[in-house]
Image (cartoon, helix red, strand yellow):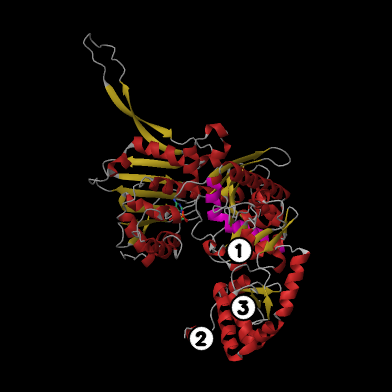
Amino acid sequence: MEKRQFRAESQRMLELMINSIYTNKEIFLREILSNASDALDKLAYRSLTDDQVGLNRSDFKIHITVDKDNRTLTVSDNGIGMTAEELENNLGVIAKSGSLQFKQDMAAKEGADAGDVDIIGQFGVGFYSAFMVAEKVQVLTRPYGSDSAWLWESSGTDGYTITEAQRDSVGTDVIMTIKADTEEEKYEDYLSEYKITDLVKKYSDYIRYPITMLKTHSRQKPKPEDAGEDYKPEWEDYQELETLNSMVPLWQKKKEDVTDEELNNFYTSKFNDWEKPLASLRVSTEGSVSYEALLFIPGKTPYDFYTREYKKGLQLYSSGVLIMDNCADLLPEHFRFVKGVVDTPDVSLNISREMLQQTRQLKIIAKNLEKKIKAELLRMQKDEREKYEQFWKSFGLNVKYGAVADYGMEKDKVLDLLMFTSSKEEKGTTLQEYKDRMPESQKYIYYVTGEDAAQLGKLPQAERILDKGYEILYLTDEVDEFVMQSIGTFAECQLKSINDEDALPETEEEKKAAEEKAESGKAVLDFLKETLGDKIKEARISKILKSHAVCMTADGPMSIEMEKYLKKQGADMAGMKAERVLELNADSEAYAALKNAVENDSEKAKVYAEVLYNQALLIAGLPIEDPAAYTDLVCSLLK
Ligand code: ADP
């Protein structure tokens, strides 16, 4: 019999499982049961359109057998089964490609042990978790529509075999030979009826097929008729088939009957997350469309959230029967992080996916859910601020995308949810909260974009705004600038970059003074433009600087931050440059020195021009074009 090798990545994952120090080994059972349930779902779904299946919904079941003598725990289902090829593909390869690599990268980054702690939750390694408790795993399976059965067998990392076998009916047995006890771990527990009952209740209670097991009980033997006076009652064992789970889906239970623990377990097992959810939300509606929904907001950003691999959507059930795993149409993009289930009798069971998109019912549900999710988030923002902050940290970026998507068409749907750090609120403020704090004299909502909030307040342009006691939003996400442009005004208050000339409204006097300064500086400005050439669009006497000497701003629609962003994206730079404006503070000493040099020593003035220009680049976080030349210039001044 030929032994086949696991693919490299699977092999590594398997090693982690086998040598697992993971304390929560017991979850293997829920993984195996959930696979069995999926297999039943698949065949049940098939039976809707295929008369040959010959089974009714009530015929589907999962059975657990404990055999203490042989140390085996067996989970059997009469679901869809697997062909030899499927066995090879499903059980020879683990998880999603790249996930282990990701995990190792993460571990390396965090300096953590490339440990097993959250692999299970993060990637739902599912079937392989059996190796945490079993020294050998056998899968005997007969696929629907076939007479032959197959046995997959593996004792761990040295590979697996697949051989032809016998099975009376369609379905699958997963036979786990439980490891011997060690000092740290009592594997024997997994052969205890009591423990198994407990685990099924704890993790798999909602599974909608009966999970049965023969349970041993003790009873008094009936007293013999001829029993004498000294008869002592005798006991005997007997076995009874019991259904261990209540089979009521959690979302069908009354809200008050569901504990937090049940909700958490349901979430972690169903959505392959290791951590409990940040929040859960029950929605049920009777009306033009009736449905029950149970939604969750995950505690952390899933590792693949910002990749194409991430699938948004909710599980869609029709009267308790799963019809679609990821129904994307139920969630708007800005809430794509939400997980959960929707159960409605109003969508037909054998509807095709294409039809599904068109159904009015689905659209109504989606609309309602969006409202409820938003309401819940706003409630959290108000009543459970820390939780909201955590939410924002995990998914805020995605919500922000909602403000710019479709050219800002949907921005009103997310406006109240947005949070930004600011000069007054390190932990974040909403636009409304900002507005409520504004002094009467303040006309605009100010913002500045850049990489590091701690540095933004130190920007030369920020000084005069902060000095007035006005708050500035510190925007550090690349998309923020686009968000600001998309929003434009909030509650009749314009959003304004602190780089804007007119960020602070001027009095007539100030205007006049500025004009005079510009007039008297004309020779200096012309000199700068001439010396620096195409590097800048123009030089200007600044209205936005207070004590600092220079800064760089941009004219036109493209800001400097946008230019940086596009560059990072690798966008074609032709014509994608911000129109740079070198701003000078006419009241600064540097300006006076420059003016003097322009009038008296043009060679020196050229050096000053270059130095000031490069300083402006530096402070704007833009690369210095020729660092060596710049250093030489500065040094030439140190004479
Ligand atoms: P996941 O369930 O997350 O896909 P698993 O490693 O748990 O990952 O299972 C791998 C695959 O093996 C499943 O997707 C399914 O196709 C198949 N499988 C596992 N258990 C069974 C079963 N009892 N019956 C039929 N197929 C199964």
Above or below — where is 35 with respect to 92? above
Secondary structure mainly formed by the magenta segment = helix
The residue pinned by badge 2 equals 633
Name the residue rendered at 76%, 63% in the picture: 507
Q: Is residue 458 visible?
A: yes
What secondary structure is marked by label 2?
helix
- In the rendered structure, does residue 401 fall within the stretch colored magenta? yes
The residue pinned by badge 3 equals 591
Quadrant of the image containing the N terminus? bottom left
Kind of residue at disc 2: Leu
Circle 3 or circle 1, nearest the eye: 3
Q: Residues within 10 Å of mark 2 (few under 14, many from 20)?
A: some
CA–CA distance in space, label 3 to label 2: 17 Å
The residue pinned by badge 1 equals 463
Looking at the image, do the residues carrying marks 3 and 2 touch, with CB atoms under 8 Å apart? no
Residue 433 x, y percent position in the rendering: 64, 49
* Residue range highlighted in magenta: 386-407
Looking at the image, do the residues carrying marks 3 and 1 touch, with CB atoms under 8 Å apart? no
Q: Is residue 338 left or right of residue 188?
A: right
Q: Point out the tag, 2 or 1, that comes first from the N-terminus.
A: 1
Q: Is residue 249 visible?
A: no
